[in-house]
Image (cartoon, helix red, strand yellow):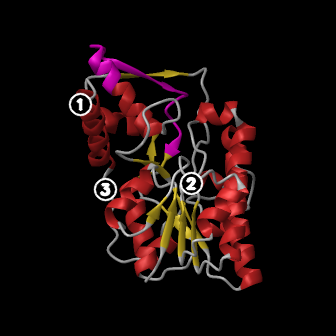
Amino acid sequence: MNKILVTGGSGQVGKELQQILPGATYISSKEYNLTVEKDVNAILSNKFDTVIHLAARVGGIIDNINYPADYFADNALMNTLMLNYAVKYNVKRFIGVLSTCIYPDKVKSYPMKESMLHDGPPTPTNFSYGISKRAMAVHIDAINEQYNKKYCYVIPSNLYGIYDKFDEKSHFVAALVKKIYDAKKSNKDSITLYGSGLPLRQFMNAKDLAIILKRMIDEDVTESFNVASKDNFSINDIAEIALKACGCEHFSIEYDGTKPDGQYRKDVSTEKMDSLFSNLQFISLEKGIKEVYNKLYEDNITSR
């Protein structure tokens, strides 16, 4: 029997995994602080066969700008400790979940392939986070070389889903849906977004990533690869798709040019992923955003 541990079990991908991988052990920061060595030792001493490491300190662009030291230290500590103790307790399979933020800020050609990971520094707006997560890829590759392991990592594009947070640490789509919801509730007919609306992004539903992680285990995939939808929309395109999904096509979109845009583009190649899996189908952005909006609406109705 494959004994599986999932860190970050209360996050959006962890909650999606619980629906399709119910037999695994799911932990969150409420039970274990993975930046503390004794906590990491305590959980991994239970001798798991497989670890899916989702846990991370994550947040929006402003939070990354305001707390760069915290983002670096927390992620570097938990990733290093998790990998060191996985080796110590002879974990057979370790899947680290990274982010396309680890890729260079600018490259000569797009979409970016896995081989381009070290072709330049990450974008300045989340440099600390990007370097800390890139370091996990380096650590995993080094462990495989030194200890003859088959550890691996996936590099997903920007994520969204029904279990995202709707606060100051929310990701872009959740923050966008919350803006639309609040504007609609206040009888306004416009929303304001940061920057220019020009940057390009690949967005993927957390449910799709969960499915791929499960397939990696079921199909014994030990390669490291990008995970993304082929769609690469501008921020303005995404906002318009969201307005349509939320029934607010008549809203206008305004942009606050005093706020940063972030990285202009960071789309990644899906060529390797496509070679590893057959019959991949991703949830459309419009359908996924509609699900997020409906979840936010339902949560607010039931909390009254």
Determine if the magenta segment contains residue 191. yes
Residue at point 45%, 75% (across, down): 216
- Looking at marks 2 and 3 on the same chain, the residue that comes earlier in the sequence is marked by 2
Q: Are marks 2 and 3 in contact (CB under 8 Å)?
A: no
- Between the residue at mark 2 and the residue at mark 3, the CA separation in whole angstroms equals 24 Å
Image quadrant where residue 246 sits: top left
Residue 72 left/right relative to 187: right
Amino acid identity at mark 2: Ala
Q: Quadrant of the C terminus?
A: top left
Q: Is residue 113 visible?
A: no
Q: Which percent across, then down, holds residue 206?
A: 40, 54
Q: Amino acid at mark 1?
A: Thr
- The relative height of residue 253 versus residue 87 in the rendered view (above or below) is above
Above/below status of 249 relative to 189: below
Residue at the image point whose x is 75% and y is 55% from the top: 120
Specify which label sits upstream in the sequence, 3 or 1: 3
- Residues 182 and 52: in front is 52
Q: Which residues are magenta?
A: 181-200
Q: Is residue 198 above or below residue 203?
A: above
Residue, disc 3: 283
In the image as oriented, which residue stretches furthest toward the bottom? 148
Looking at the picture, tell me which residue is in the foreground, 183 or 266.
Answer: 183
| Residue in the picture at 67% in, 55% down | 78
Judge depth for marks 3 and 1 and give the one in front: 1
Which element is circle 2 on? Answer: loop
Instruction: Find residue 204 and report its horizontal and vertical position in percent.
Output: 41, 53
Check disc 2 and report the residue beneath it. Answer: 55
Pointer 3: residues within 10 angstroms few (<14), some, or many (20+)? some
From mark 1 to mark 2, how far is it between C-alphas? 29 Å
Q: Amino acid at mark 3?
A: Ile
